[in-house]
Amino acid sequence: MKKSVKYLPREKQEDLKYLVSMILERIPGTEMIILYGSYATGKYVEYDSRVEFGIRTTFMSDYDILVVTSGAKDKEVGQKLDNIEAIYYKNQSINDILYVGETGNTEASGHGNADRQTPVQFINEDIKKLNRDLSDGRYFYTQIKEEGIILYNRGRYKLERRRKLRYDEIAKQAKEYFDEKYKKAILFFDQTRFMYDKKEYAMASFNLHQTFENLFYAMRLVYTLENNKMHNLVKLLASVRKYSEEFEKIFFPEKTEEEMRLFNLVKAAYVEARYNPGFRVTKDEVEYLMAVAERLFILVRELCDIRIGEYERSASAAA
């Protein structure tokens, strides 16, 4: 893992140094502190403000921080991290006030505007569980290990390497991932029906997007045990179509421009249904896409059941 954040702007380095000191002061069982996500990969957005569809929107990347502990109670650590987060925001707000009082310039260096303070998101794991998950190749933690940056290391433990899994372990993981993502897809489809009944067709299209997204995630995880956060339905469809030609037939049975238009409609709904008051979706369009979703549910379950069955047969043969 990388160990330096010198590529980050000075104020970001200072933020992280402050957060590390707060964690070490308040959580004595801390073994490691790891920065992951966009600030670790260098793909962060410091501050983005733009007018879209007549509405000003802003976006900032979070500091994503994994706090690894040993022998600590999860609930207590969670409460302490919540307190650290509150102190961090309060401290930054006070600094902004002092800075503005001295300079009178509320825009300099982003100070004087609490909305521009970089948010922080903590997660906590016990070192033993983390190493089990790394050894088992759990995709979320293996990605953190591959891309993350060590901000602090007590030096008592090493992070495990991913080992070669037995087929029974692969089957177990695949089942867990399938159940998680398929259940989420069902929940989003339930929300689609709710919004449809309320005649909120734009929000129904957003929930359809989330339905499709989670069904694609289920496929990717069952077939590879790996996944990365992605919302672009074009890329998600491209990543699973190699497992079956039926994906293409579900979305584009006649290969018409209208089918492509409706696919692009639900693709755009991830952003536009939430932020564009002028985004229009009709009852007929939602009904068509709901029918597509119903066929996709069936296909994904069939293909995932087949794949998990192959893992289980391989496990039995190996035993």
Image (cartoon, rainbow, N blue to C red):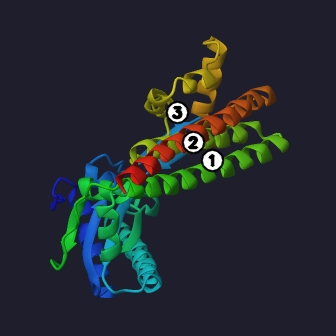
Whole-percent x, y for residue 69 in the image: 31, 79
Q: Which residue is mark 2?
A: 215
Q: Which residue is mark 1?
A: 185
Between the residue at mark 1 and the residue at mark 2, the CA separation in whole angstroms equals 6 Å
Whole-percent x, y for residue 153 in the image: 19, 74
Please name which of the two marks, 3 or 2, marks the residue nearer to the observer: 2
**Quarter assignment of residue 211:** top right
| Residue at 60 percent of width and 43 percent of height | 210
Between the residue at mark 3 and the residue at mark 2, the CA separation in whole angstroms equals 11 Å
Q: Which residue is mark 3?
A: 233
**Viewport quadrant of the N terminus:** bottom left
| Residue at 65 percent of width and 39 percent of height | 297
Is disc 3 placed on a helix, strand or loop? helix
CB atoms at circles 1 and 2 under 8 Å apart?
yes
CB atoms at circles 3 and 2 under 8 Å apart?
no
Q: In this view of the protein, which residue sits in the foreground, 40 or 218? A: 218
Whole-percent x, y for residue 314 in the image: 40, 48
Is disc 1 placed on a helix, strand or loop? helix
Dot 1 crowding, Cα within 10 Å, few <14, some 14–19, many 20+: many
User: Which amino acid lies under the numbered mark 3 shown in the image of this protein?
Assistant: Leu
Is disc 2 placed on a helix, strand or loop? helix
Q: Earlier in the sequence, mark 3 or mark 2?
A: 2
User: Which amino acid lies under the numbered mark 2 shown in the image of this protein?
Assistant: Leu
Between the residue at mark 3 and the residue at mark 1, the CA separation in whole angstroms equals 14 Å
Asked whether residue 171 is in view, the answer is yes
**Quarter assignment of residue 80:** bottom left
Q: Image height check: is 232 above or below 110?
A: above
